[in-house]
Image: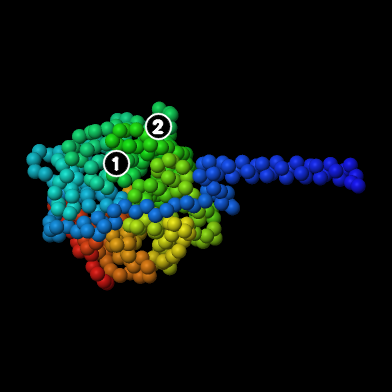
Amino acid sequence: MLFPEGQKFIMKTWSFTKTWALCIGLIVLFAIATGRTESLDGYVTWNVIADPGNVSDLNNDNPINSAGSIPLRSGQVVTPSYSGRFIAVDPQIPGPKRFGEWWQVYDLKNLRPVGPDFPVPSNPGNGPILSPNGAYLAIRAKTQRGTIDIWDCKTGRLVRSLRVTDGLDDEYGFPADFVGANRLLTMCHPELFPLAGTYTHYQVWDLATGSEICHFDTDIIWGSKWATISPGGHYLVMARTGTHLYHLLAWDLTTGQSTGEVEFQGKNDPWGQACGLVFSPDARRLAIVWRLGQQDIWGRVLVFDVVQGRQVASFPLDYTMKSIGLGTDIGRPALQWTPDGNSWLILGHLLMDARAGTITGRIGAEPKFGAAWTVQQRNFVGANFVTDVVQQGLDRKLQYVPVPTKD
């Protein structure tokens, strides 16, 4: 026979157990309903699959005439994130002197212009981005800080203006990157130059209709050094770093829902700066250029398995390139994958084997001290050539440079 106190204890324990079971059941039901599952550390479980673009196009886009070139007015060029087929340039065209920023898009396989050259009003430091099919330029409107202008590269006309907002009228809007050929990821926040950690409102837009597809908010501000979109346009991945915190976060760009958060290096590994976060052409790996700035090692290339959600390799980057600098110039990741996915182009100069981490060649002369901050403006055109901006006196041109097969 139990004493009253024992009976009360059993009843309280039974009540607590039922309540706990009910809470667990509700969590499970919520996870099933929303498709979100929590890992043991409280983060959304990594649930990203390979999302490649058209890999065959990347390998087969070699130029028809590799001796051809494009005369340039300035050295400004803009290329899509995952396509070497198209490029936007500031062309040198005879005639009256032109003022402001002019752009013309070329097909690099045949060196033919997609359309006419056309002026694009812009704000200092806020250049355009180019869609992977060469059809659109997107840029922050010059006179309306919360508006993104979309220009048709075939006609040179403004075809759409997107008002990006989180419900407030005083937000600064910016294009982040194209999501495939006909969608655009934008962001907005209260300040023109926001501090790190500022909550940012992201929206995905259908450019054919001008309608919003999805939106979400996070405290990470887009930057091409620590953010990227999968080649197929399904996922956004961004790096979040802090004291003993080195995470990758992913979002589904069709729904705006989180698809996971996971470490890309251990809590006690050395702190660094992300200088590039880039998917492989088959979208099964992510390469992260991690600048350490130590005396004996400049940094590392960390390789992350997208499907397994874990780091699988880490290769040192030493001072083989004497003027390697910081590699932190805005707008150009410090790494490109070769179209076959077997190598990397580091800072537009060093070729590195993506499986062994060894230097296999160089493209062009090593940049000197004047280029210490920059990533060289070279981009793959098919598997065997890269573009290069060359200046001879006052003349500039864009030309092709063959990719060496070995050092």
Residue 246 picture location, percent across and down: 50, 54
Does 356 appear above or below 276? below
Does 81 appear above or below 217? below
State the CA–CA distance, disc 1 to disc 2: 20 Å
Alpha-carbon neighbours of circle 1 within 10 Å: few (<14), some, or many (≥20)?
some
As helix, strand or loop, the secondary structure at mark 2 comes to loop
As helix, strand or loop, the secondary structure at mark 1 comes to loop
Work out whether residue 4 or residue 125 is closer to the camera in this orientation and state it.
4
Q: Is residue 406 left or right of residue 191?
A: left
Work out whether residue 254 or residue 108 is closer to the camera in this orientation and state it.
254
Task: Give the number of the disc on residue 182.
Answer: 1
Amino acid type at image mark 2: Thr
Residue 344 picture location, percent across and down: 32, 62
Q: Is residue 164 left or right of residue 244?
A: left
Residue 82 picture location, percent across and down: 30, 52
Whether residue 47 can be seen here: yes
Q: Please identify the quadrant where the C terminus is shown.
A: bottom left
Amino acid type at image mark 1: Asn
Alpha-carbon neighbours of circle 2 within 10 Å: few (<14), some, or many (≥20)?
many
CB atoms of marks 1 and 2 within 8 Å? no
Residue identified by numbered label 2: 165
For the point 25% across and 41% down, the residue is 136
Work out whether residue 247 or residue 2 is closer to the camera in this orientation and state it.
2
Q: Is residue 289 left or right of residue 153?
A: right
For the point 43% across and 68% down, the residue is 296
Q: Residue furthest bottom?
A: 407
Work out whether residue 121 or residue 201 is closer to the camera in this orientation and state it.
201
Whether residue 394 can be seen here: no
